[in-house]
Each structure stands twice: as structure tokens, then as C-alpha cells.
Image (spheres, grey):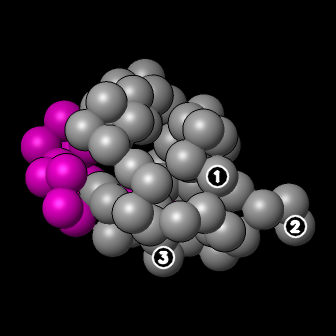
Amino acid sequence: MEEIKWSDVNEIAIQLTDTHEDVDPQWVRFTDLHRWVCELPGFADDPEASSERILEAIQMAWIEEAR
């Protein structure tokens, strides 16, 4: 399994869709989103390296993936 970084927005969205299939990503708080990304298997980036912009991009990609 390859390591996942914050910049792997689409891969993160795919994994979140699979991991949290009962969640509507539109209503996820960034604090929960941050924690869930850090808990993904293969996530190997600095948890402090995220930003609101990155979390927003992940959330948008997740919304698209969940459609």
C-alpha cells in the first residue's frame, strides 16, 4: 500500500467514501474530517500539515465521490 499524503485528495475521498459510507460528507465538521483522514490506513503525513483549504478540497472531492 502506498503512503497517503494530504495532497492525495482524490485517494482520500475514495477511502473516506468506503470507510464512512453512512455519512453525508456535506455535513462533516473539519475536526472530524481531519481525524478520519489521519486514521486512514496508509496515511503517512504530518497531521499538523493540513489546512482549511486542504480539508475543503477533500470534502468537495468526497461529496463528488459519494454521488
Label 3 is placed on what type of residue?
Glu
Under circle 2, the secondary element is: loop
Under circle 3, the secondary element is: helix
Relative to 14, residue 54 above or below:
above
Residue at the disc numbered 1: 5
User: Residue 61, can we see it?
Assistant: yes
Image quarter of residue 4:
bottom right
Q: Is residue 23 magenta?
A: yes
Whole-angstrom CA distance, mark 1 to mark 2, is: 13 Å
Dot in front, 1 or 3: 1
Relative to 19, residue 61 above or below:
above
Q: Is residue 2 left or right of residue 28?
A: right
The N terminus lies in which quarter of the figure?
bottom right
Q: Residue at x 55, y 47 (%)?
A: 6
Can you give x and y, in whole percent of width and height, for residue 31 in the image? Answer: 18, 61
How crowded pointer 3 is (Cα within 10 Å; few <14, some 14-19, many 20+) is rated as: few
Residue at the disc numbered 3: 39
Which stretch is magenta?
19-32
Can you give x and y, in whole percent of width and height, for residue 14 in the image? Answer: 58, 44
Q: Residue at x 33, y 70 (%)?
A: 35
Q: Residue at x 44, y 67 (%)?
A: 47
Residue at the disc numbered 2: 1
Q: Is residue 31 left or right of residue 55?
A: left
Mark 1 vs 3, N-terminal side: 1
How crowded pointer 1 is (Cα within 10 Å; few <14, some 14-19, many 20+) is rated as: some
Q: Residue at x 58, y 54 (%)?
A: 15
Dot in front, 1 or 2: 1
